[in-house]
Amino acid sequence: MSSVWIMAAVALSFCVSALFGKWLVPFLHRINFGQTIRAEGPSWHKKKNGTPIMGGFMFIVGIAVALVVCEPLWRHQSGENPDVMYMQLKIIAGFLLAAACGFIGFLDDYIKAVKKRNLGLNVRQKLLLQFLTAGIYLYTLWHAGCGSKTLIPFAGSVDWGVWYWIVCLFGIVGIVNAVNFTDGIDGLNASVTFFVSLSFLVIAGILKLTQAAIFAGAVAGGCLGFLLWNFHPAKVFMGDTGSLFLGGIVCALGFTLNMPIMILLIGIIYIIEILSVVLQVCYFKATHGRRLFKMSPIHHHLELCGWSEEKICTVFSAVTIICGIAAVLMVHFGF
């Protein structure tokens, strides 16, 4: 019976996200909320100038509707089990983390759209708000009784002590920005996150955590519905509103399953993307102006090497699938 609720969450999130686009895309055109393309970016991206941003509202609404409809109905059917109530609290806190990150992205997108600048909030402003958001989320988990133990395949439950909260604080901010860096070409971020959420869905199924599976299914459906509008050539971009929200939701999925460390494997593409930016900056400063990559994040380097946007999406998605399968196998045989 639980599989019915999971499939319902996927289908409902997909339909709401896809159908919401029929209203949102024309609305964004009418209010002239278009992307200003970076002058130093690939020259062929200039034709995308003016493409609406803030399309991330599609999957934000889709995921929210699916959770509001499916998760409480399943919980009511399952009774007032304390473990079920505790999982619901973690899901609500996780969604609010993502929503707060999305709001930071919205502020950034709004500045871009109104001021017609590619750069919105500065780095210091973004990081301050992100650390504040992550800190409130972790405090909520701690106050709700979440300890410093996490599940690690083949190692079981490992207690990190006080370092758990410190590492998680920086880890959340890092992952949120890593997912943000993965945005930049048509369909890339949504397709990678679709397969990331599917991996978490399967892991939740293995652990028999139906509520977490509903959560992951809602994310997968929302990403898929958005992709109908974001596949190359994109009719709308998710903007920082969407990419920062997805960063928060990926973190939330990991913490909901009490396996945040698995994000490093399942979300390997996010890690590669942010590492390429860090390496580029460090190399540039160390060599006084030389570049390690033609452009960072690495998906732009591959573009300048001749890869099409479709090829990058396909290869990055394939890597995510392979790492997701590896993570699923580790959980299956590791517990």
Image (cartoon, helix red, strand yellow):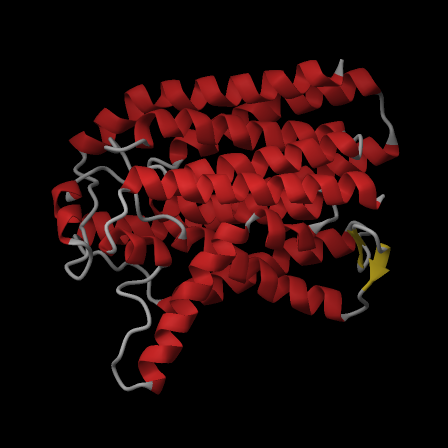
Left or right for 162, reference 122? right
Question: From this viewpoint, is residue 321 visible?
Answer: yes
Residue 219's x, y, as percent? Answer: 54, 32
* Vertical comparison of 221 with 112: above or below: above
* Quadrant placement of the N terminus: top right
* Residue found 21% across the figure and 45% down from its top: 35
Rendered image quadrant of residue 59: top left
Residue 197's x, y, as percent? Answer: 57, 36
Residue 134's x, y, as percent? Answer: 59, 58
Q: 40 or 35: nearer the eye?
A: 40
* Quadrant placement of the C terminus: top right
Residue 108's x, y, as percent? Answer: 33, 54
Q: 28 or 193: nearer the eye?
A: 193
* Vertical comparison of 312 with 120: above or below: above
Q: Residue furthest front?
A: 306
Q: 137 or 330: nearer the eye?
A: 330
* Residue found 33% across the figure and 72% down from its top: 292
Left or right for 181, reference 197? left
Rendered image quadrant of residue 264: bottom right
